[in-house]
Image (cartoon, grey):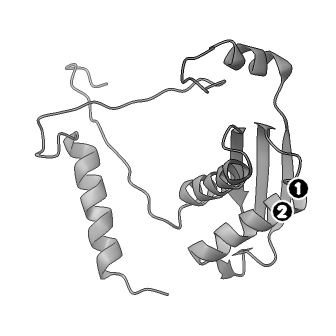
Amino acid sequence: MRKDGDFLFTSESVSEGHPDKVADRISDTVLDAYLAADPEARVACETMVTTNRIILAGEVRGPSSITSEGLIQAARDAVKDIGYDQEGFSWRTADAANYLHAQSADIAVGVDSAGEKDEGAGDQGIMFGHASTETDTLMPATIYYAHRILHEIRDLAPCG
C-alpha cells in the first residue's frame, strides 16, 4: 500500500500451457476417472508439475479398481491432450508418481455426518472475487482485461 492509502490491484490470467492449468487438467482427469467408476467417490487430488515430472497427491474414497498405474496413464494422457511432447516436459517421458491414498477416517466421518445435506466437501478453500460494475460482464476490470488480452494473444498465436 502506498503512503496516501491508495493501492495498485492487478490480476493474472494464464493460458492452457501454464503449469497451474496443466495441474488442474490432470486433477480433473483423476476426478473424472473416479466419478466414472463411482458417482459417489470423493477425491481430493493435488497435482504438481515441473520439469518432466508429474506428482499426484491427496486422498480419495472410491473403488479399488482404479489402479496407480491407471491414474499415472490418465495423467500422461491429459498432458498429451494438452500437447506437451518436448524436451523438458513430455507425456511420454515425464517421471510420474502417485501419492494418492485412502481418505482419512476423520474426514470421512465429518463429511458423512452431513446427512441429507448435499455437501461433499472435506476440505477448506479460500475464494476471492466479487461482482463489480466496472465492466458489462460484472467482473472486476483487472481480471476482465487480463482475460481479454490473453484471449487476443491466443487467437493471434499460431497453433502447434
CA neighbours of label 2 inside 10 A, class few (<14), some (14 to 19), many (20+): few
Identify the secondary structure beneath mark 2.
helix
CA neighbours of label 1 inside 10 A, class few (<14), some (14 to 19), many (20+): few
Q: What residue sits 75% from the left and 20% below the top?
A: 107
Q: Is residue 51 at least partly visible in the picture?
A: no
Q: Which mark is residue 67?
A: 1
Q: Amino acid at mark 2?
A: Gly
* 114 relative to 104 in the view: left or right: left
Q: Amino acid at mark 1?
A: Thr
Q: Are marks 1 and 2 in contact (CB under 8 Å)?
A: yes
- On-image quarter of the N terminus: top left
Q: Position of residue 110 (x, y in %)?
A: 71, 14
118 in relation to 17, above or below: above
User: For this rendering, which residue is in front, 44 or 67?
Assistant: 67
User: For this rendering, which residue is in front, 53 or 35?
Assistant: 35
Q: Which mark is residue 137?
A: none
Q: Is residue 2 at least partly visible in the picture?
A: yes
How many labels, in total? Answer: 2
User: For this rendering, which residue is in front, 43 or 14?
Assistant: 43
16 in relation to 1, above or below: below
* 100 relative to 45 in the view: left or right: right
Q: What residue sits 25% from the left and 45% below the top?
A: 142
User: For this rendering, which residue is in front, 127 or 106?
Assistant: 106
Q: What residue sits 88% from the left and 52% below the top?
A: 65
Q: Quadrant of residue 138?
A: top left
Name the residue furthest front. Answer: 116
Q: What residue did someone put label 2 on?
A: 70
